[in-house]
Image: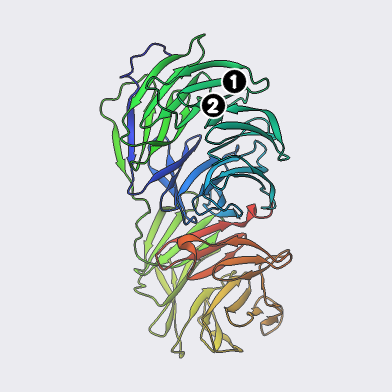
Amino acid sequence: MIKGLPSEWGTCFRTVGFTDWTLGLACWKDTVALGLGSGDIITLDRITGSQTAIFSGHTGWVETLTFSSDGRSLVSGSDDTTIMLWDVQTGGVIKIFHGHTGWVCSVSISADNTTIASGSDDSTIRLWDILTGECCHIMKQQGQVQCIAFSPVDPQHFLSASSSEVQQWGIDGQQINPTYEGSYVAFSLDGTQFITCQGATIVVQNTGSGVILTKFRIPSGDSCCCCCFSPDGRCVAVAVKSIIYVWDITSPEPLLIETFVGHTRQINTLVFSSPSSLISSSHERSVKFWQIGTQSPDPVVTHLQSTPLASALIKSITLQDGTAVSSDLDGVVKIWDISTGICKTHFETPAKNPDWSDIRWIDTRLIFVWYVDQKIHIWDVGQEKLLQKVMITWSDIQDIRISGDGSNIFCLHPDYMGAWSTWTGEKMCEMGLKDTGGTKSLIIDGSRVWVYSHIWEPQGWDFGAPGPSPVPLVTMGSLHFSETRVWDVGLSRIIDTINRKVVFQLGGRFLKPVDVQLDGWYLLTRYQSGEVLILDFNHVFL
């Protein structure tokens, strides 16, 4: 640590601007998560500042964020009173936690990744079991619970801060004495120290004994907004209104080594991203990256949209072996990296403004089908070759899908469901449907296909069963999705019909998808906006 640097050193080296309020902030290795006023969460690359993904689901401001210790999960708290657990790689919602009656101010996750602690404007602290989604304990605290912090090394212990006091708690919901003064609290990375903000005084204490190790005052005399330890425990950063101060606490007397000036409005969140760098978010709709001890007279300024701009409307999407493939109204087929949402490559096809379409990998061939002008077109994307063009006498088509093994093309009419051979174009069979009312859709699971409606029970057939004709499936009002689970799929939620619990609830602008697809252990939905949501079910039943 370089000591005694003048305060004009250590300037901002990157500013990322947004069109929305920037609120909660969290960092894990090179991934930065940021909560927005729109209810979205975006992730940024810590090195470049570029946007890498967007998570949508909250309907209110995302006030607080925290990563799990392994970086695989992200927990968010919002003004909509909910807490969400996200899969960082896929952007899928693992669980939604309901119970608070006020906006969620702070969230923290235990070191063993089994428990979430949340503090709210409703003056309560809640402990949540991540596996079950249940609220284990509810504790009352005087006033708004502004800050929650689990010990980084002890999953049985956490601290909470209201406007005037810091309390210690056990995982059993019992308070541990004593109580300290303070309106904000944070642990050191090794868990041996914690810091409290007591107005303009910052106090560092030993976690085990509570003994005060050092204290210092903010030069301006104003109260602290938030504070944090550097990863190596040598420094403490404090945000006061729009200014950041950094102290070296390794000396007998703490030494103020940096004063960062650059924000124009109050700082919301402050985190160390390395022993010598900080990231801050502010009400001025920006995130700033700071470097301790390095001059940067011309900081890089990047402007990001709060949501990605969609191109042509996505008409179909499928997910196989970790690769997402989509097609749009312009006939463009795209292959996507599901961890970032970035298009890796794309192909042009003759399909223009198709009524319905679907796409699937069949062995090593990427087959694209679309319906327009009463014809099914079957296209080999790699060879850029039309394999078949099949005339359909039906005038009202509601959906088209390729079977899981790629052998059949299923086409849906309000009164019928027909199957055609992918390779010959020959019509295999036509199945009558039991009710003509309501909007219908096709859902594929391997060789099995269901016709799903919201006003009558699904009808299903197994086209892979022995015999000349597909075998009708007994659905019992549900959809068979795997060997161990049976699912009831609606436009807004999925219910595990074994225990009748909702395992996934769509929300926010993702409340009404155009259709729902189940593919292996993934759920896919697409929207009129052109956006796609992919949910990884591997995390639902851990």
Q: Residues within 10 Å of mark 1 (few under 14, many from 20)?
A: some
Q: Is residue 463 visible?
A: yes
Relative vertical location of residue 419 with respect to residue 212 in this rendering, above or below: below
Q: Amino acid at mark 2?
A: Thr
Identify the residue at the far left of this view.
298
> What kind of element bears circle 2?
strand
Give residue 167's position: percent from left, percent from top: 63, 32
Q: Quadrant of the N terminus?
A: top left
Between 80 and 367, the residue placed more toward the observer is 80
Relative vertical location of residue 225 with respect to residue 143 in this rendering, above or below: above
Q: Amino acid at mark 1?
A: Gln
Identify residue for label 1: 205
Side (left or right) of 63 relative to 118: left
Q: Upstream in the sequence, badge 2 or badge 1?
A: 2
What's the residue at 41%, 34% (across, down)?
280
Between 135 and 272, the residue placed more toward the observer is 135
Give residue 197's position: percent from left, percent from top: 51, 27
Give residue 222's position: percent from left, percent from top: 40, 26
